[in-house]
Amino acid sequence: MLLQKLNVSIRTDFEVQNTVEIPTYSDLTHFLENKCKALESVQFTTSYNNEHYKDKSKQSYQSSSFSSNKKSSEIKTGYPAFMTTSNNNATPYQSNKGDKLKCVLCSSSHALYRCFSFLSKTPQDRLNFAQQHNLCTNCLLASHSVRKCNSSFKCKICGSPHHTLLHLDKAIDSYASNTPINSNFNHTLDRAILESTPGPSVGAMASTLSTKQSTVLLSTAIVDIKDIRGNFQQIRILFDSASMANFITEKCVNRLGLPRKRFSIPIEGLNGMSAQTNQGVTHCTIKPCNDSNPLFSFDSIILPKICSGQPKININPSSWTHIQNLKLADYSFHKPGPIDLLIGAELVPHILRSGRILGEPGQPVALETIFGYILQGMAVSDHVPLHNSTLLSCHTSIENNLDIQLQKFWEVEEIPKISSLSTEDVQCEEIYRSLTYRDQSGRFCVPLPFKIQNPFFRNTCYQARRPFISLEFRLAKNPELRKAYFEFMQDYLNNGHMVLIPPEDYNSPTAYYIPHHSVIKNEISGPKLRVVFLMLVFETRMEHLSMILYL
């Protein structure tokens, strides 16, 4: 595992040196010590040449470190190189001049940036100490000033030409000044200090005091949301006053069973980043937990995911005395958890109240809302992540794309079409308004008036008689079907849907005879009879009946 941390050139030299037996850990450390001495000698020669030939370009080499391939700064004559081994003990090595590295503060044999007494000071005290002892504020060495410093490293926080330990930040300094240094501290790798330290170190490993990790706490709350059945379920929401729209996750929509409508529009965020959503939009109704009022109803755009879990890291709020005895909107604010719904600027002003409670520096502010107090602002945690933190910014805006804008342009320029009703349409509308009604059972009663007065029909009785005689022969062969057909027609007659015509009106040219036949539908309970009336069969002067009726 340790060999994997070395670069290719050093690993190759080590493998060439040990070609027969399997190397041990002591063989590796012995090889690295010799390698450090050799690199120190080469670096000394480079530094000597730069001191006497200033017209030449500055020399630097790629440091072969234990864990990273960072550039090592030039080492002045008389300062030894340091290497951190597995037991975290810094082992000094004599340079060619024989001078031993000495801490300016405690006179021990280590660099100033590794001095625990120096690390326990605040950044302002460290800066004052460096200025009082005429130290280079970039590399913390006393052999030159900051103007003559050959180091290529700068502050890893602000990028200015000073050491990271001397960086002055109000939020960090106020916290560091109130944080005592415990003698039983833990050693950890501080990458920012390591990369900005141009001290005479060949190995890139350095042991420094662990610092606290800070994060920004975003406002969250636990609320009740109505599902498709009218019941309320609890979800976790995020407040974002910089968002023009509300968003809900697709997982939450599926869990609640909310109906969705088609919706597709580009969403624009920071730096012009845009995303297209086609999951649709749904209507949401939320309220405070354990309370029936107030209710907030709004539309939310459906997204596969709103953001990662919030907060990013676990937070210990035990020292936040200003939030004690407060009714919080989210009692799990200090634990990373998923976000189901994002509330935008449409509702945030209506949810906030006038209450506002401030804490100490490095602690979030408590804001009063309808759902309880929400927390927002800087928060400090004991947890130090091994990776860079991801910043979350939920600023979103709804932007119309080019196709939609072009469509609206043509709609504005297009001459509006005025729809006009025909004479028959106007007559149908008038009949529907004046003669249509609902009976006691809730059925609609619609008249069927003729378009012309006294219509004339020819031979409809003769044309209806032929299929009726054929139907009679078919029913005679099936007594059960004949019985069912007779019962249906009798029921039709009893309900007033048809009447018997007197003999004198038989074969009248003003009457329209409608043929009919049976349709059998097989069901689980048995065959079911349905009688079908045919009005489009006969060819009359008006072709068929439906053409002379207002339908």
Image (cartoon, rainbow, N blue to C red):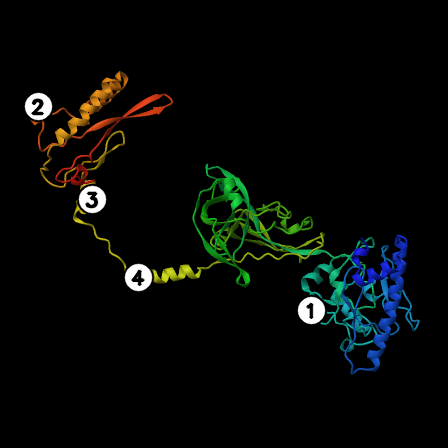
The crowding category of the residue bearing disc 2, from other C-alpha atoms within 10 Å (few below 14, some 14 to 19, many at least 20), is few
Mark 4 vs 2, N-terminal side: 4
Q: Is residue 520 above or below residue 103?
A: above
Amino acid carrying mark 4 in the image:
Glu
Q: Nearer the viewer, residue 37 or 226?
A: 37
Extreme residue in the right direction: 98
The disc placed on residue 414 is: 4
Amino acid carrying mark 1 in the image:
Gly
Between label 3 and label 1, give the one nearer the viewer: 3
- Give percent across and percent down for residue 406: 39, 62
The residue at which mark 3 appears reads as 429
Amino acid carrying mark 3 in the image:
Glu
Circles 4 and 2: CB distance less than 8 Å? Answer: no
Using the rendered image of the protein, determine whether residue 182 is visible from the camera's viewpoint: yes
Extreme residue in the top direction: 479
Q: Nearer the viewer, residue 8 or 45?
A: 8
- Give percent across and percent down for residue 506: 9, 26
Q: Nearer the viewer, residue 545 or 372?
A: 545
The crowding category of the residue bearing disc 3, from other C-alpha atoms within 10 Å (few below 14, some 14 to 19, many at least 20), is few
The residue at which mark 1 appears reads as 159
The kind of secondary structure element at disc 1 is: loop
Between label 2 and label 1, give the one nearer the viewer: 2
Mark 1 vs 4, N-terminal side: 1
Q: Is residue 55 above or below residue 526?
A: below
